Image (tube, rainbow, N blue to C red):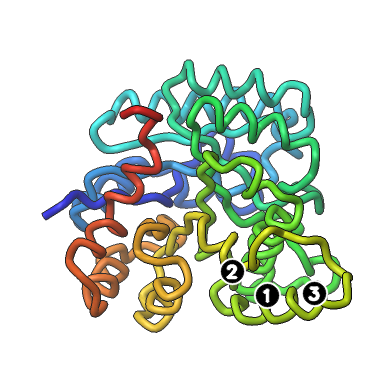
Amino acid sequence: MSPIWDAHTHWMPPEVAEHTAFYQRGWSDITLLLRTLDDAGIEKAMLLYPSSDAHLNGGGWSRVCDVYNLEISKRIKEHPDRLLGAGILPMDSPHEMVREIDKIMELGLSCLSLASSYEGTYLNDGSFLPIWEKAEKEGLPIFVHSQTINPIGFDRVKDPLLMPVVEYLFDITMCAGAMMMSGVFNHYKDLKVVFAHFAGVLPFLADRFDSTYLMLRSRDMVKDLGSLPSHILRNIFVDISGVKSTSLLNMALEFFGPRRIVWGSDFPAQKNSIESINALEDLDIQREEKENILGKNLINVLKKKGE
């Protein structure tokens, strides 16, 4: 049995959680996290930042980065056989972001954790280009989490259920689409970007992306992307974020294929990792493909060039 690696878990340092509106309860329990990994037979888990409002109340982005990255580094050094860590960047200081990447690597963190947008600005914005260049050069994967603070649509609909179910997913969908349209995926071909939650609703939109793109190209209303949108988008990586539906998993497999999907639990938002693993095991695909999704794909994403 190949190892199971979780590409999407959260642990919030108490010093950061106390400055948030949502993450103060249940998001700082490292003992519960490790026990959950043990119960589900998960060998390693990637700690990602869930995106939060901590920077608004905790001294700004630079302060939150200092505390969060250091505390995540401490946890993975305490549990090197169980945990991996992704660092965050000071999003209000573009000139400091590349230097923060150097600090993140010095702390032993293996990738970067970004939100799909920041105050309405998506990751296609020119201010992020130095991050893509640095990450590609250093072989650092980028893990993109849905923005949870004022995601797309929140200015019009403020609802405690619709926000996490609909607005989070459309924010990350828009992010992936905007990065495609700006040429990020075509230009930085060695950059590895992993989007949470299947990159939102992208698998549902594949046919519409292509048919609409061809129609608009025929009228010279959209730029030439070099290939169909679906061909570009199926080369990103996505995680399944604890999904238990075999129909959703099959749709993602049809679009992305078994080498571009990584398994992730979304703990502690989703606590039943075993159900999600079992749903994947129930799929009518090859054993090798299941093992790729459950761990090998993430292991390969984290490999440096030449390893």
Image disc number at residue 157: 3
Residue corresponding to mark 1: 209
In the image, farthest residue toward the left: 1
Q: Is residue 296 above or below residue 134?
A: below
How far apart marks 2 and 1 lie (CA) works out to: 7 Å
| Front in this rendered view, residue 157 or 248 | 248
Which of the 4 image quadrants contains residue 220? bottom right
Residues under numbered marks 2 and 1 in contact, where contact means CB atoms less than 8 Å apart: yes
Secondary structure, mark 1, is helix
Give the position of the C terminus as an image quadrant: top left
Query: Where's residue 49, x and y in %?
Result: 54, 43
Q: Residue at x 57, y 31 (%)?
A: 135
**Is 217 drawn above or below residue 127 in the view shown?**
below
Label 1 sits on what residue type? Phe
Quadrant of the image occupied by residue 59: top right
Task: Identify the mark at residue 230; answer none if there is no mark.
Answer: 2
Residue neighbourhood size for the residue with mark 2, other residues' Cα within 10 Å, grouped as few (<14), some (14–19), many (≥20) = some
At mark 2, the secondary structure is: helix
In percent of width and height, residue 84 lies at 37, 36
Give how far across and how far down residue 72 sits, in percent: 45, 30
The span from disc 3 to disc 1 (Cα, nearest Å) is: 26 Å
Kindly tell me whether residue 148 is visible in this rendering. Answer: no
**Element at badge 3?**
loop
- Image height check: is 253 above or below 133? below
Residue for point 36% across, 75% down: 244
**Pointer 3 or 1: first along the chain:** 3
Question: In the rendered structure, which disc, 3 or 2, sits on the residue that comes first in sequence?
Answer: 3
Tell me which numbered mark, 2 or 1, is placed earlier along the sequence.
1
